[in-house]
Every structure is written in C-alpha cells, then in structure tokens.
Amino acid sequence: MSEIDELIEISRHYGSDSAYVIAGGGNTSFKNDERIWIKASGIPLAGISEGGFVCLSRQKLGEIEDKTYSEDSVLREEQVKSDMQNAIISPKDLRPSVETSLHNLIDHAFIVHTHPTIINAVMCANDAQKEVEKRFGSDALYMEYTDPGYILFKKLQEEIRSYRQRYGSEPKIIFLQNHGIFVGANSPSEVKDIYKAVVSRITEEKDLALPSGRLETYQSELTSLVSDYYASRKLVAKAFRSPISNHFSLSHDQYQKISRPFTPDIIVYCKSNYLFLEKGTKPKETGDRLREFEKAMGYYPKVIVEEKGGLIILEESEKSIQTVLEVFTDMMKISLLSEQFGGPHFMTDEQISFIDNWEVENYRRKVAKK
C-alpha cells in the first residue's frame, strides 16, 4: 500500500467515527522531504479520496515560517493565505486546510488532527492543563487556546522548539485547549495506538458514560410557531429530543452550560449564540423573542432550546439540520463530561468574534453546505 493509500485509509477510519470527527471537522496529512499532502478545507474525512487532498511544496511552506507579516490580523491572514496558495502543487482549485503549516511543522510523516468527544471533554474543561499534566506528563505538549491560523502556527512553533530542547524529541501528542488534538507518528498503525492510549489515560478512574436513550423527533406548539414564523423565508425547522437534551432543557440554569460555544467548529456549524424559550411561551412573545434575537445577533437562531422540551434546529435544508444537530449534540456531551474535569470552559467573546469574522471559516461553511 502506498503512503497516499495509507493516508486515505486512516482519514476514513477516523472520519467515519463520530466519536472523533463530525461534519467537515479534523484534518490529516502525509509528508516526505519535499511534499505534503493534506486534506482540503471543508472536505469531510469520511469517504475522502485522493482528490480530496492538496499537495504542496514543503520548501515554499517553510518560507512562511520565517517571513514577517502585517500586524493587522485581517491583512496578515490574507497574506498568509496567498503564500499558502503559491505553495500548492496540485490541484489548484482546492484550498488546503488552514492548519497546513502546523502539519508541516510537526516532524512526523503522518499527522491526524481530530476533535474527539472524550478528549474535548478535557480540552473544554476548566482543569484542562492540570489534567493533561497529571495524565500525560512529558508525553504530551499542551497549548492554551490561541486564535487559529498564523498566530496559532507561530505559537506552536515556539512551543515545539521548547519541547525539543527540554526532552530531546518531537511531541507525538499535542493538546489544544478548546480545540482538539494532533497526533503524529511515522505510520498509521502507530497513530491508532497513540489515540487508543490517549483515550485510555483520560478515562482512567473516571465514569464517562453518557445518558442512554435514542434521539427522537419532537413536536410541540412552540415548534409549530417557530416553523410558521420562518416558513416565508424558506427555512426548515425540525425538533428533536433525547436524554442528554432533556438534561440541558430542564431549566435556564442547565441551559447556561451549553449557552456558548466550546470550539471553532461549533461556531462554524451552529453559530455562537442560541435561544432558550420557556415552556408555554405565547405566539406573540415567541415572535418578539425571535425578532429580538435576530436584531441583536444579525442572524437567525440555528438552535432553540425549549424548556422541558426539545431542540429546535433551524436551517436551509434537511442536510444542514442534520449537521447542526450532530455538532450541537456533541457539544452537549462535551459539556456534561467536562463536569468531571472542573466544569465547562467556554471560548471568550474575543475568541468567538475572531472565528465569526474569519474569512477562512466562512469559506469552510460554504464548502460544507455544498
């Protein structure tokens, strides 16, 4: 089996497992001395083929490492994006993952970056760093949250250099707060072994079982009101409930634990603000609350939590509804499990604003919808 075939196999392996990857999240790569093949932005790992990867020159990517860019964040990201496009060998019509430079930086042939539920239960918890240090010690590199893109790349570049100086080796495990994990190795089998070991260490001495029970469709007076309100705008509303959604819809206090995003992917697919509506909210008040939300946020609520009811998902198509539901359900799981690691740790307003306004993530939204 060629290295590219191995890359496709391990990409599909994790991409088809919702415990590791949801929607278009995560990315994988393989590199040799001259070239790197990395997943294209917005392309799902599940079912990916060779045509879903972008091949780039490592020499040209290396020039980004030492180049000085504008201090203006918008201009800087455009400059970096341009230089990355210039490094593309083929195909020219796809955009490489925004984390390409990170993959190029880590000195292992295969890199698999995912956002696993169990791992993000720690990464999105208040005690993330303490838990990583306790469970992994020098076996892993931990980084506090940093805005994705060039800033994250430069920060990780410094941290990896420091790690090499301290331990005389390359980190195989890199944890990113409120983001996910990078695992690097020189073979896919070793990558899989490392992932298994990581999950084993995290679950040690912890009961991380989630509420059992099926996800079911749901209907109430409120779901009908929301559906009718947005029908003229050709938006589709569907409602669901499950034991885990029941846990967070029980009261406004419970809802607060899922009221803000944990990771950039949640913002990409679900936006950064959601709406809680009390049970028995009357038609006129429902309309008023929806109008107030849109006026304040500038967009319709993709997720509405009905008190002691279900999740109302609002989107442009059935497919988009399913994606939002999967991502938000994963967010609820992370919040619930994070209670065993110090409680949920949300992204800050500044971090959220960066993702909301970042052209790269807007591009990923568009590709995902297609």
Image (cartoon, rainbow, N blue to C red):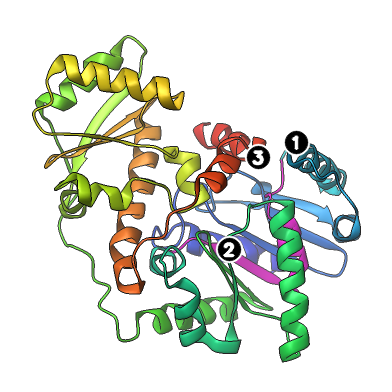
Taking the image as shown, residue 343 lies to the left or right of residue 283, namely: right
Identify the disc placed on residue 93.
1
Circle 3 crowding by C-alpha within 10 Å: few under 14, some 14–19, many from 20: many
Residue 230 at x, y = what percent?
Answer: 30, 16
Residue at 39% x, 57% y: name it: 18
Residue type at mark 3: give it.
Val
The Cα atoms of the two marked residues, 1 and 3, are separated by: 15 Å
Mark 2 or 1: the one toward you? 2
Residue range in magenta is 95-116
Residue 347 at x, y = what percent?
Answer: 48, 52
Residue 83 location, quadrant? top right
Identify the disc placed on residue 175.
none
Residue at 39% x, 37% y: name it: 273
Q: Nearer the viewer, residue 368 or 76?
A: 76
Q: Is residue 236 above or below residue 196?
A: above
Look at the image and tell me whether residue 9 can be seen. Answer: yes
Residue type at mark 1: give it.
Asp
Residue type at mark 2: give it.
His
Residue 330 at x, y = what percent?
Answer: 35, 54
The Cα atoms of the two marked residues, 2 and 1, are separated by: 23 Å
* Quadrant in which the N terminus appears: bottom right
In the picture of the structure, the residue carrying the numbered disc 3 is 360
Residue 164 location, quadrant? bottom right
- Determine the secondary structure under disc 2: strand
Identify the disc placed on residue 113.
2
The Cα atoms of the two marked residues, 3 and 2, are separated by: 18 Å
Q: Which of the two discs, 3 and 2, labels the residue nearer the N terminus?
A: 2
Q: Nearer the viewer, residue 252 or 150?
A: 252
Label 3 near label 1: C-beta < 8 Å?
A: no
Q: Is residue 298 above or below residue 80?
A: above
